[in-house]
Amino acid sequence: MKNQIHELKKYYCEELAKINSLDGLKELNDSLLWKKWKLNDILKGLKDLNESDRKDIGMLANELKDFIKWENEKKEAEIEKLDFIKIENEEKIDVTLAFPNENKGHLHPISLTSKILEDIFISLWFKVEDWPQIETEEFNFDKLNIPDNHPARDVWDTFWISDEINADKKVWERYLLRTHTSPVQIRTLLKWDLPIKIIVPGRVFRYEQEDARHTSNFYQLEWLVVGKWVTFGDLKWTLDTVMKKLLWENTKLRFRPSIFPFTEPSAEIDVSCQLCNGRGCKMCSGTGWVELLGAGMVHPKVLEACNVDPEVYSGFAFWMWIDRIAAQRYWVSSSRMFYQNKLKLNEQF
Ligand SMILES: [Zn+2]
């Protein structure tokens, strides 16, 4: 039995020297060692020996077991080190080499348009506000004079946050993806002292049928001015100034009376379509006009909801579609194309 143990050790050492991979080491331990020489069987057979032999052979067998364990670990570390050196040699990275791809990427046309708009408004002393895209029902609808039974809630089919999260919320506290940037009007009026002049560029979500002008997620820019003696004349002057800076000299504007719950009086404002120069195309649905803005004087009920006295203060608000402005600026026939990640389109900007 002693010979068996010695031979086993010799065989193991010879085979180990030939091995240069972890797989090979595993194979030696699994298939050859245990099956051919059955070290475990030797250990099991100890019980049939007399006491002094059992002690001697048991000690030898255990020594061999520890030896194999120790040698295995040494070999493993050796193989790993060699592998690492191999990888290091093969995959050298020279950080001083020139980057092979010159195409560094750039801002998306919607971000570009948003930046241009922000610059225009900052030059007119507006402050830029940014708020989360998840809102409560109260700020998205209730405080904007859109009560539960108001038909406007039907117009804007809403993406609600899952029932599990909303389950223990009161009706007005339920979470949704904001359908417009107008909740920021409320949050700002509640937070800041008057007068205020803010813009809110941001992403909004509506459950809409997609076409050339409609997508289920898009970008709006909200403007709000509230102070003493703010009139509809101020609204028109601001719009005129911004549009002259934003679009071209020949751009025509068209005011149409409209109804919005949070403004009174209200107007929808169209610009003459830059893509077809007013002749009619897919973008303008053949009318020659593109609806770019909604606007109006802030409704007294909205001011009251924010603890502002409508007898003393007044204001105006605008909200515009950044995607549609980008489409007009860059002559893109459908604002939906901005969300399709097509390099052919994005590389042009
Ligand atoms: Zn057109």
Image: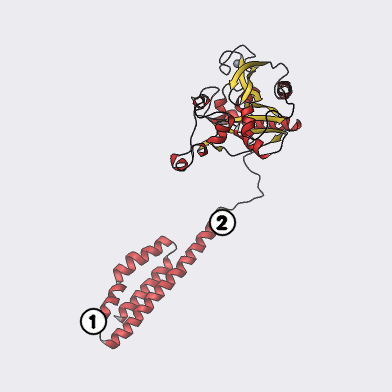
Q: Quadrant of the C terminus?
A: top right
Q: Quadrant of residue 7?
A: bottom left
Which sits earlier in the primary sequence, circle 1 or circle 2? 1
Label 1 residue SS: helix
Count of labels in the image: 2
Position of 297 relative to 143 (above/below): above
Instruction: Give how far apart the Cα atoms at labels 1 and 2 are.
Output: 55 Å
Figure check: 5 above or below 210? below
The residue drawn where x is 60% and y is 34% is 183
Residue 109 in view in this figure: no
Name the residue tied to disc 2: 89
Q: Amino acid at mark 2?
A: Asn
Q: Position of residue 149 (x, y in %)?
A: 49, 27
Q: Position of residue 216 (x, y in %)?
A: 52, 29
Eye-nearest disc, 1 or 2: 1
Residue situated in front as seen by the camera: 223 or 53? 223
Q: In this view of the protein, which residue sits in the foreground, 309 or 87?
A: 309
Measured as percent of width and height from the top left, residue 118 is found at 69, 32
Residue 127 left/right relative to 76 = right
**77 displayed left or right of 2:** right
Q: What SS does tag 2 mark?
A: helix
Quadrant for the N terminus in the image: bottom left
Going by the picture, which residue comes out furthest to the bottom? 52
* Residue 311 rendering spot, x and y as whole percentages: 69, 28
Image point (72%, 23%), residue name? 231
**Tag shown at residue 317:** none
Residue type for callout 1? Asp
Q: According to the image, label 1 marks what residue?
A: 48
- Name the residue nearer the viewer: 294 or 325: 294
